[in-house]
Image (cartoon, grey):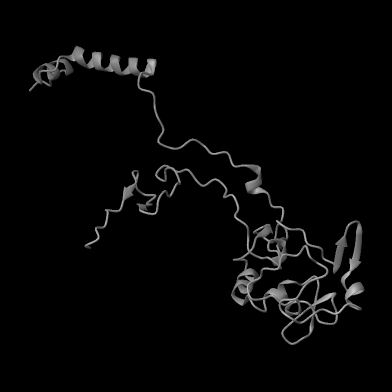
Amino acid sequence: MDSLTPESEFTKRGLPSHWVAAVLFAAALLLLLNLLPFRSPVEARTTTPSWATDATPVRSPKDRPEYQQAVYSYRCSGCHIIIPTSTEVPHERTQHREIHLEHGINARCLNCHHPTNRDAFVDDAGSEIPWNEPWRVCSKCHGPVYRDWQHGAHGRTNGFWDKGQGEQTRLRCIDCHDPHHPTFEPLQPAPGPRTLRMGQQDYGPQLELHDPLRLKSTLRPAVSEGD
């Protein structure tokens, strides 16, 4: 039995061979003229602002027990050695009026500051804590957060993950939190990722179900009063 030639095969199937050439020519024309341009489903690249990657600490507290007044600096013990601190809560302050004290129920200065040596902090036993070790003061009340900070889960670690290539430095509590007013003010979030299926990261109203795996948003069905 003789094998069929390509032409006789197309003829047998009712498909003339010149149609194949016409289809290929049309496809080549579409590609050449770019009549059907490719549209990527991936969102355009988001430029990350420089402030979002700035590693500068939020605060720059002094490592020395000094009080700045205009152009003059005073050591804390220089005044407090002759000026007693009231133990009443609350009490009217004649100095340090710029301090906004809002630290929950911790409204007594001597809970953190040593009662006789104002150049040091105080622990639960009444012993002195050096001024340059403020995390020991925070650990008195914030034990779980302190343990997270010790293990690197809280706060920010700078430097090298591989300690063989360089040192690591960890921010202290007061490098981010004001000890007198530790709550963060609202911060502008950095741009989020824009992947293929996440879409616009807008949570919208409370009734909307946010599902990053869905291309279209879905609303919860309205609940009638009788349900």
Instruction: Please name the residue shown 29% across and 15% down the image.
Output: 26
Q: Is residue 112 left or right of residue 217?
A: right
Q: Position of residue 151 (x, y in %)?
A: 62, 70
**Among the 4 quarters of the image, the one containing residue 224:** bottom left
Q: Position of residue 42 (x, y in %)?
A: 43, 37
- Exactly how many numbered labels are in the figure? 0
Q: Position of residue 52 (x, y in %)?
A: 62, 47
Furthest toward the left, the residue is 1
**In this view of the protein, which residue sits in the foreground, 197 or 20?**
197
**In this view of the protein, which residue sits in the foreground, 21 or 110?**
110
Image quarter in which the C terminus is found: bottom left
**In this view of the protein, which residue sits in the foreground, 61 or 94?**
94
Instruction: Say if 1 sits above or below 64 in the image.
Output: above
**Among the 4 quarters of the image, the one containing residue 196:** top left
Furthest toward the bottom, the residue is 125
Q: Is residue 215 left or right of residue 57?
A: left
Q: Is residue 92 left or right of residue 160?
A: right
Q: Is residue 191 left or right of residue 91?
A: left
Instruction: Say if 61 sits above or below 114 in the image.
Output: above
Instruction: Please name the residue shown 79% across and 85% down the image.
Output: 127
Instruction: Please name the residue shown 64% across and 78% down the image.
Output: 141
Q: Position of residue 29 (x, y in %)?
A: 33, 14
**In this view of the protein, which residue sits in the foreground, 27 or 172?**
172
Instruction: Say if 21 sits above or below 58 in the image.
Output: above
Image quarter in which the N terminus is found: top left
Instruction: Please name the residue shown 36% across and 49% down the image.
Output: 213
